[in-house]
Amino acid sequence: MKDVNLLINNNVNVKKSLELFGDMQTYDELLFEFLNIVDEKISKIKTYKEIGDMANYAILSHSLKSDARTFGFEKLAEIAYQHEMAGKSNDIYFVTEHFNEFMNEASFISNLVKQYFGKTSPMVNNLNQDNNVNNLSNTILVVDDSTIIVSYIEKMLGNEYNVKIANDGQEALNIIKNDSSNIIAMLLDLNMPNVNGYQVLDYFKENNLFKKIPVSIITGEDSKDSINKVFKYPIIDVLSKPFNEARIKEIINKMLNFK
């Protein structure tokens, strides 16, 4: 049986996370999704470090940072942020010098979560169950490479809208090019592999799509420069991670009222 004290006693800020999720059931459901992806994410970070691909190293470190902040893993979030910044500045010396600390903390959190659920937890993911059977025509396109973020948004909006997911900018562009008729709004992350959020915004600008599909940004970047840069496009608003249900619905209403 899960005991939240295991997390609390290992310096996990569960209380802060519950300000986002609202209750332990939602926290546990999404934490279990994190458990399913964290080892693969760690493995990819190692690969990008080994081949010297600092651009994708920064993107994956950013993604792990966002997940860690979401669940209250504050030490891992801070370390991942440092590596994100080092990757962006191509500071291979810093990455190499501090890589073991990064991986040790990531592995510690992975093992802690496994212990929390038990090695053979019978828990199943049913977050998308309702959305698989609805026939809602109004579609919100959510573009983010974090399964945690998209699952949370889908859980919040799935009873009112058909939530369509793209895991990077290229997937989003393919969806928009092939069938955008029912898409009434888009939530777009900035830092993604393959095609990033800025490239999607450029495509919207070049093809005059902002009036057809209102766009708001979901991002963990809250620097003044990044905010100023993104508001050069005619977006509706910026949804900073982490966010709660009320903020998501506020953003959606703003986009729909604009349209």
Image (tube, rainbow, N blue to C red):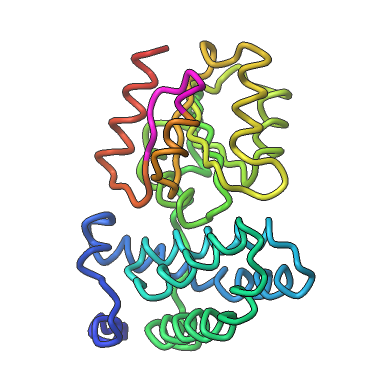
Quadrant (top left/top right/bottom left/bottom right) for the N terminus: bottom left
Residue at the spot x=60%, y=59% of the render? 58
Residue 160 drawn at (x, y percent): 37, 32
Q: Position of residue 84 (x, y in %)?
A: 54, 61
Extreme residue in the right direction: 51
Range shown magenta? 231-239
Question: Is residue 19 located in the magenta-colored stretch of the structure?
Answer: no
Q: From the viewer's perspective, is 93 left or right of 258?
A: right
> Is 5 displayed left or right of 98 in the figure?
left
Q: In the picture provided, is 10 more to the left or to the right than 174?
A: left
Residue at 47%, 57% (x, y): give it: 148
Quarter of the image holding residue 12?
bottom left
Between 50 and 106, the one lying in front of the other is 50
Image quadrant holding the C terminus, namely top left
- Position of residue 21 relative to residue 182, above or below, is below
Q: Residue at x 44, y 30 (%)?
A: 216
Q: Main secondary structure of the magenta part?
A: loop
Relative to 195, is 245 on the left or the right? left
Q: Position of residue 151 (x, y in %)?
A: 46, 52
The correct choice, above or below, for 132 with respect to 40 in the image is above
How many badges with numbers are in the image? 0
Residue 39 on image: x %, y %: 59, 76
Figure quadrant of residue 89: bottom right
Against 113, residue 65 (above or below) is: above
In front of the other: 192 or 122: 192
Residue 234 falls inside the magenta stretch: yes
Q: Nearer the viewer, residue 234 or 172?
A: 234
